Amino acid sequence: MANPGDAAGVETAELEVSKHKITWHQMDLKSFVGSTAASVMVMETITYPLETVKTRMVSDTNRNASPSMMKMFRSIVQKEGVRGLFRGYTVGLTLSVPGSFAYLVTNEYVYDALEKRYGGDVKAHRSVLYHDLLLHGISGAVADFVATFAYTPLEVISQRMMVDRRTGADALRVRDVISSTIKSEGIGGLYRGFQAAFYCYAWSSGVYWGVYEAMKTVAFRAFGGRTQRNQNVEDRRWTAGRWFVENVLSYSSSGAVAALAATSLSNPLDLVRVRYQLLESGSKELQGGYWRFARTVVQKEGWRIWTLGLRPRLMGWIPFVSVSLPAYEWLKSYNKTSDD
């Protein structure tokens, strides 16, 4: 026989999640986009060294000589200095802001549209977890398709600078990469691997937002429901504790699980994307197209395609989202202008 308390706990958790969800039309968009753009710049700065290490690791096709993450990190610092970890940082930061702007705006807009059109039907026939996985997963995938138009040139330029080991006056510069790419491949060269990037990021983003929103329901059920049982205790300690549990612990744990799932499941696609975008102009591997190249990489690397470069990706994303997602949710709440 079902426990009425458990049903009440599930209902309370779902109400708590619903209460915290803030959609597109409820926010001051100018303020929201500006504040999130600033957070993107901070994120890019913090995670960029790990991105450089990961790119060097996955670009190395010598299976017997692939160094570990820490060995690669120390090698870059010893031979190229700390600046070696930030190769291509300027162009990466410049293009990541409009790309993130397009991503966030599209994600919020598409989810709001899907919720209005299909949200009631999905909730009526499926669980809340299914609703979150489906609608947020679709909106995240669509958002990354739009953002890929800004991200792809960023990746082509910054990744080629990341793998360049020359220092001083001989080091590769942004204008060198752009001019040589356009000269040999035309403007389309800056969009090399657009297909690869779309497959990687649409899949990763769909998994990430779907799991994150679904996990929030689980987190509020585990944490928020417990605090609701104590709501007759009206003192500052309980209020502060409830705020911490709901706004920090729930969002952080949900983000960490989502980052783990999305990063792990998209690692093979990310490895193929990086190697495809780093191919030399006129390479025979380019002539065969993306899918033939992907099959070649899978056959050569085997099971390593799931693990190569995964550690720096996880180390960059899990700690960061554990901090940034409570901030992201707070920014949405701070820029909320209505309850309608």
Image (tube, rainbow, N blue to C red):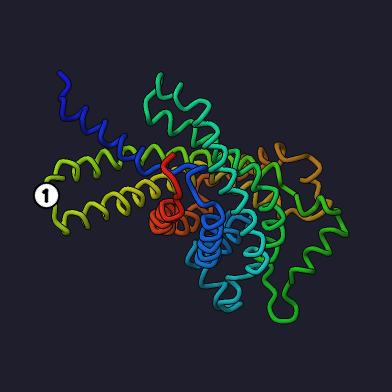
- Residue 177 seen by the camera: yes
Q: Residue at x 57, y 70 (%)?
A: 85
Q: Residue at x 34, y 41 (%)?
A: 19
Q: Amino acid at mark 1?
A: Val
In this rendered view, identify the residue nearer to me: 290 or 296: 290
| Disc 1 secondary structure class | loop
Query: In which image quadrant can residue 232 be found?
Result: top left
Residue 24 vs 86, above or below: the answer is above
In this rendered view, identify the residue nearer to me: 317 or 301: 317
Q: In which quadrant is the C terminus drawn?
A: top left
The residue under label 1 is: 233
Q: Mark 1 packing: few (<14 Cα in 10 Å), some, or many (20+)?
A: few
Query: In which image quadrant can residue 48 be found?
Result: bottom right
- Residue 67 seen by the camera: no
Q: Residue at x 54, y 67 (%)?
A: 45
Left or right of 128, for residue 291 = right
Q: Position of residue 11 (x, y in %)?
A: 26, 31
Residue 140 vs 251, above or below: the answer is above
Q: Position of residue 26 (x, y in %)?
A: 47, 44
Q: Position of residue 324 (x, y in %)?
A: 43, 57
Residue 54 vs 113, above or below: the answer is below
Q: Position of residue 136 (x, y in %)?
A: 49, 37
Q: Residue at x 46, y 27 (%)?
A: 119
